[in-house]
Image (spheres, grey):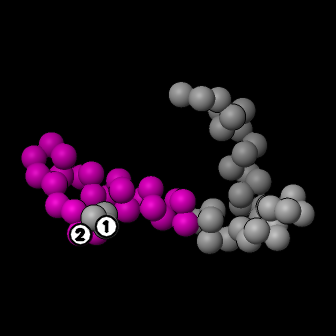
Amino acid sequence: MRPEEAMYSGTAEHLQQLWVAVRAAVRNVLDEVSLADVVRGRMPAHVRRLTTPPAAWQPR
């Protein structure tokens, strides 16, 4: 089910907003990076910035 179609109630009512935000964040990276970018090792600046903080490399 797509996040915009899902309905939650009670304490979970804001989950829909969370899932839409997660999808938008993933799209912000994947829609802006081509396979050619990956092969060349040339990521857009906003994608490189996401990998700058050491915490980005740490598992949780």
User: Which residues are drawn in magenta?
Assistant: 4-27
Q: Which numbered tag is attached to residue 5? A: 2
Q: Residue at (16%, 54%) from the top-left corner?
A: 8
Q: Main secondary structure of the magenta part?
A: helix
Q: Which numbered tag is attached to residue 2? A: 1
Residue type indicated by callout 1:
Arg
Would residue 49 be counted in the magenta stretch? no
Q: Position of residue 6 (x, y in %)?
A: 22, 63
Q: Residue at (71%, 68%) from the top-left corner?
A: 33
User: Marks 1 and 2: CB-CB under 8 Å?
Assistant: yes
Q: Residue furthest left?
A: 10
Q: Residue at (77%, 54%) from the top-left corner?
A: 48
Q: Residue at (53%, 28%) from the top-left corner?
A: 60
Quadrant of the rendered image containing residue 7: bottom left
Q: Which numbered tag is attached to residue 39? A: none
Quadrant of the rendered image containing residue 37: bottom right
Helix, strand or loop for disc 2: loop
Residue type indicated by callout 2:
Glu
Q: How crowded is mark 2: few (under 14 residues within 10 Å), some or many (20 or more)?
A: few
